[in-house]
Image (cartoon, coloured by chain):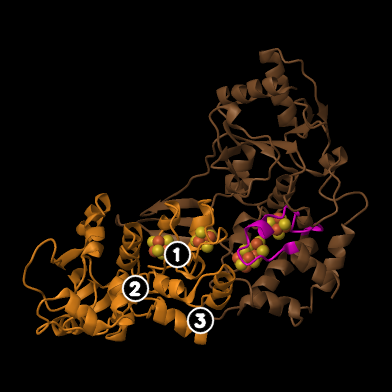
Chain colours: A brown, B orange
Amino acid sequence: MDKKQLQKFIQWLQEKNYIVIGPTKEDGQILIKTISESSQLDFSGQLPLYSFKKYLVPSREILFKYKKDDFKADLTAFKQALIGVSIFDLKAILLYNQVFEKDPYYQARLNNTLIIGQSQIPQFQNLSFKVWEDKYEEDILEHLQFDIFLGQAKEKKSSEFKIFTGSKKGQQILNDFAKQSGWKSDFEHVEYAGPIKEEGANPEMMKIKEKMPGSLETDIWQNLDQRCIECGKCTIVCPTCFCFSLTDQPCLNKDEGMRKRCWDSCFYSEFSEITGGHKFLKNTAERIYNWYYHKFVRIPDEYNFPGCVGCGRCSMVCPAGIKIHEVLESIKTK
Amino acid sequence: MININPKPTRLGREKPTVAIISLTACNGCLMEIINLGQLLKGVVDRLQITEFPLVRSGKSPTKFDIAFIEGSVVTKENLKTLEQLRKQSKFLIAIGACACIGGIPEIKNYRDREKLIKQIYKSTKNIENPLIKPLKEYVKIDLEIPGCPPNKKEIAKIIASLLVGKIPCIPQRPVCYECQIREYNCLLQKGLPCLGSITLGGCQAVCLKSGEICSACRGFLSKPAAKNLIKIFKKQGLSDQDLNNLLEKFGVRDEFEKILKS
Ligand code: SF4
Ligand code: SF4
Ligand code: SF4
Ligand code: SF4
Ligand code: SF4
């Protein structure tokens, strides 16, 4: 598929009532936004600082409203097409799919979402952000969940995309598009083979996982305790962070109110606070340790893959200059 | 810092009586309440507003279920009003930066007050010129709604909570949270001295929206990582003088210094 056909395809999706969402350039920043025209999409391969996660779990959402005894949960979701999802963000969606497996709001949204991935190795200004030694070859696709995937040819200037499908829905849509537009249908189907590679769990991950427990007393965390400002920016940009808080908010109208869900961060003081005021995470060292512990021990324990996809966003946004690959290095060599 | 003193909030009435009172202030906070606009209709329907100097004057009843008070104590008269209102009210809410953290008037605490007063008034004979303090230093305050001006949506939410007997609370999340879920550019990373990471959020990061740094008009989080923030500021070359000017803008320099010492 070439760029022109891709633009046609996007237009066609819009005609089919899909809200099309993808990376677009704004004031020199790549942001993920709803686009009205396919020409707004940015395929430069630069990693958007803020990931796609807000379209699957919005930063703020109303779970239900009540009016006296009448109770309404709104599970309607718009049809949306997420386009240009990087491999990092696709991996993060794998985790979300597990974590929110039983969440009806998430599932409603996911069912109405067409995920269109795109393979590009984001061009970090600083390659040392690299967390995992991953090769972005095509075989990685069988361990990702997506509907359609745009494989960009390796030669830089080429505007040809090699098309893959990863779901029945993706196949169906491409077939429909071919029928209605005259596009010479040409795609390869990849069968999803689960999140973990045949070789088993990532050995790097296992190494970190072994070294983490009991390291709280080491100066790794004491050093970070003296640097981190607890702004929580890293959790907001991290495509895998999924913590939220629930708030019941009465309205000014009598007997009306709602329950809201909004993103939260383990860096904030109330995150681990329980009735009576006890906090499980008492200081900065414990909070930042928890952040790593969750991503590199608890999530691997639960799902057998790391809670970090290696996108480097947390390092890019940290005002204190904390770099995840450096921290992991010191954990590994402790 | 936000003080919430749990106390019975079943206000016990269908229509609680409410007072909204100003001390020495610009009235900007009261304007925010008036500006609740559409929401105000809901407020008026369910409250009995008996004291609201900007809207009407009348004789005051002896007891209020909820009282909002804005502004600073500048005169003896102000102090009397505040103490009187405390006695009359079940739930006393300080509203706005002046009432909660000292605010703009506190700037004079960091200057030569006596010299300043002479520059401003022809005759200084009857002008009282005290240090400016947050209201909680004079009387017990049950809830603080900070901000210069306070956020009207937040005011509405707090009133709605009080009406069902829930103790309202403002989540202890920094301004960075709201700034970043809105995907604004981080000014701290660009080398500007933004106080957002140690400031109590709830303002929807309005300053960052217009490309201005946060100068902490909502006061600080309960346990901010100020010691680490200052390291970043120093590294970026912020002078002590510039930092002090920034912190004095809303009168939080004393608070900040206390945190650094703790
Ligand atoms: S590199 Fe950082 S932001 Fe990216 S997934 Fe890992 S922890 Fe999250
Ligand atoms: S606990 Fe912290 S690191 Fe883990 S998902 Fe939640 S916010 Fe992210
Ligand atoms: S972005 Fe950096 S300073 Fe902010 S909470 Fe994360 S690690 Fe701490
Ligand atoms: S601009 Fe200020 S408020 Fe926004 S993230 Fe940066 S430090 Fe926080
Ligand atoms: S961003 Fe900071 S200074 Fe601006 S309104 Fe919010 S708390 Fe006040």
Q: Is residue B177 visible?
A: no
Residue A78 position (above or below residue A206): above
Residue in the image at 58% along x and 49% along y: A57
The Cα atoms of the two marked residues, 1 and 2, are separated by 13 Å
Q: Which residue is mark 1?
A: B201
Pointer 1 and pointer 2 on the same chain: yes
Say few, some or many: other residues with alpha carbon within 10 Å of mark 1 (under 14 / 14 to 19 / 20 or more). Answer: many
The secondary structure type at the circle numbered 3 is loop
**Badge 3: chain ID:** A
The residue carrying mark 1 has its beta carbon less than 8 Å from ligand 5: yes
Q: What residue type is disc 3 on?
A: Gly
Residue in the image at 17% along x and 65% along y: B49
Residue A65: x and y, percent? Answer: 42, 51
The Cα atoms of the two marked residues, 3 and 1, are separated by 23 Å
Q: What residue type is disc 1 on?
A: Gly
Residue in the image at 84% along x and 36% along y: A191
The quarter of the picture where the N terminus of chain B appears is: bottom left
The secondary structure type at the circle numbered 2 is strand
- Judged from the image, the quadrant occupied by ligand 3 is bottom right
The secondary structure type at the circle numbered 1 is loop
Which residue sits furthest right? A199
Q: Nearer the viewer, residue B105 or B73?
A: B105
Q: Which residue is mark 3?
A: A276
Q: Nearer the viewer, mark 3 or mark 1?
A: 1
Does residue A305 appear to the left or right of B33 in the view shown? right
Q: Is residue A317 magenta?
A: yes
Residue A132: x and y, percent? Answer: 82, 55
Q: Which residue is mark 2?
A: B144
Dot placed on the residue nearer the N-terminal end, 1 or 2: 2
Q: Is residue A235 magenta?
A: no
Q: Is residue A195 visible?
A: yes
Q: Which residues are magenta?
A: A303-324
